[in-house]
Image (cartoon, grey):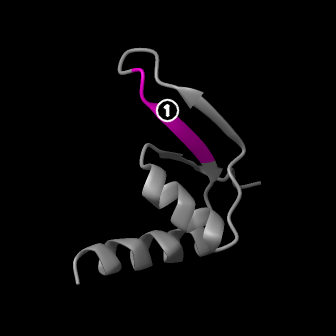
Amino acid sequence: MKKNKLFYCYSKPLKEFLIENGERFITKSIHEKTRKKYWIFIGSEKLNDLLTAWRLRKHS
């Protein structure tokens, strides 16, 4: 059985983009050293496609 990788998201705008497009984070926390909030998503093909769209949108 293949394990899904986890995606750690430290960007609030990216987190909002993923949620707007149907993704759900499994938990949120605060990084122990940096004190930055982050959200964890389960990796999937759809998540990869959304991350690609995000990168292309940022660079256009």
Looking at the image, the residue that sits furthest to the top is: 33
> Measured from the top left, where is residue 1 in percent x and y?
77, 54
Front position in the image: 52 or 14? 14
Reply yes or no: does residue 36 show up in magenta: yes
Quadrant for residue 47, please give it: bottom right
Secondary structure, mark 1, is strand
Q: Quadrant of the C terminus?
A: bottom left
Task: State the residue in front, 54 or 52.
Answer: 54
Seen at 51% across and 74% down, the residue is 50
Q: How many marks?
A: 1
Magenta segment boundaries in residue numbering: 35-40
Q: Is residue 23 above or below residue 11?
A: below
Q: Is residue 53 above or below residue 19?
A: below
Relative to 56, 19 lies left or right: right
Q: Name the residue at 22% across, 77% down.
A: 59
> Which residue is tagged 1?
37
Q: Main secondary structure of the magenta part?
A: strand
Looking at this rendering, what residue extends furthest in the right direction? 1
Q: Please tell me which residue is depicted at 55% across the width and 60% down the height of the picture.
A: 16
Question: x and y percent of residue 55 in the render?
Answer: 33, 72
Residue type, label 1: Lys
Membership of 56 in magenta stretch? no
**Left or right: residue 60 compared with residue 36:** left
Q: Residues within 10 Å of mark 1 (few under 14, many from 20)?
A: some
Residue 41: image location, x then y, percent: 62, 51
Residue 11 place in picture, x, y as percent: 42, 49
Foreground residue among 49 and 39: 39
Q: Is 59 above or below relative to 28?
A: below
Name, please, the residue furthest toward the bottom.
60
Kindly identify the residue that appears in the image at 57 percent across and 42 percent down: 39
